Image (cartoon, rainbow, N blue to C red):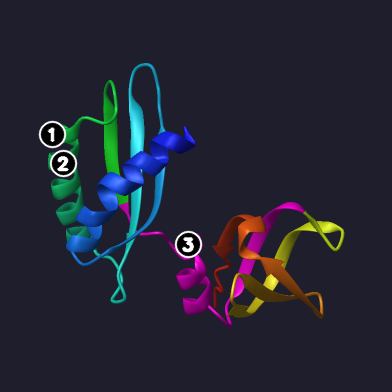
Amino acid sequence: MQRNLNQLWQLLEPVVTGLGYELVEIEYNPSAKHGLLRLYIDHEDGIRLDDCTDVSNQVSALLDVEDPIPGHYTLEVSSPGLDRPLRGVRDFERFCGEIVKLRTGMAIDGRRNFKGRLRGVEGDQISIECDGKLFSLPLRSIEKARLVPIIG
């Protein structure tokens, strides 16, 4: 599955960025009858319905030609939402100072789950302040990271 997502990423990212958007995430849920391919896009000015429609039309045309997914599926294009995923150095730098929730592949200082303020990025390490303590985590150890929405 991960290989398929990497191939989809390589195919679709140039189209999305060529339209002026950032490809944030790809989810693919295959099904015997009807699968679902969901793209999350972002833009510094936010995402409107027209943006999703434009990206959907271009991506759909490309998928029709390249045919990387067997069978029937639905294509959805959406904004990443308030709890947007963080994928690489650029995301961690961009959202420095925000509250994040992340999970590491292996325990670091006896824990795998961290929720706190993202304090910085230096080289291949991020620093996050959790429970009054500063942790330095290798980027490669992070399995999943998301912003924590602050409501109110």
Q: Nearer the viewer, mark 1 or mark 3?
A: 1
For residue 92, which numbered disc appears in the image? Answer: none
Which residue shows up at 19% across the image and 37% down it? 63
Check if residue 112 falls in the magenta segment.
no
Residue 148, above or below 53: below
Q: CA distance from mark 1 to mark 3?
A: 30 Å
Q: CA distance from mark 2 to mark 3?
A: 26 Å
The kind of secondary structure element at disc 2 is: helix
The kind of secondary structure element at disc 3 is: loop
For residue 65, which numbered disc appears in the image? Answer: 1
Residue type at tag 1: Val
114 vs 5, left or right, is right
Residue 115: percent from the left, percent from the top? Answer: 70, 67
Q: CA distance from mark 1 to mark 2?
A: 5 Å
99 vs 80, left or right, is right
88 vs 45, left or right, is right
Q: Residues within 10 Å of mark 2 (few under 14, many from 20)?
A: some
Tell me the residue that label 2 is attached to: 62
Badge 1 or badge 3: first in the primary sequence = 1
Image quadrant of residue 145? bottom right
Q: Given contact means CB atoms under 8 Å apart, are the residues at marks 1 and 2 in contact?
A: yes
63 vs 31, left or right, is left
Residue 112: percent from the left, percent from the top? Answer: 76, 55
Residue 51: percent from the left, percent from the top? Answer: 20, 61
| Start-end of magenta stretch | 78-106
Tell me the residue that label 3 is attached to: 84
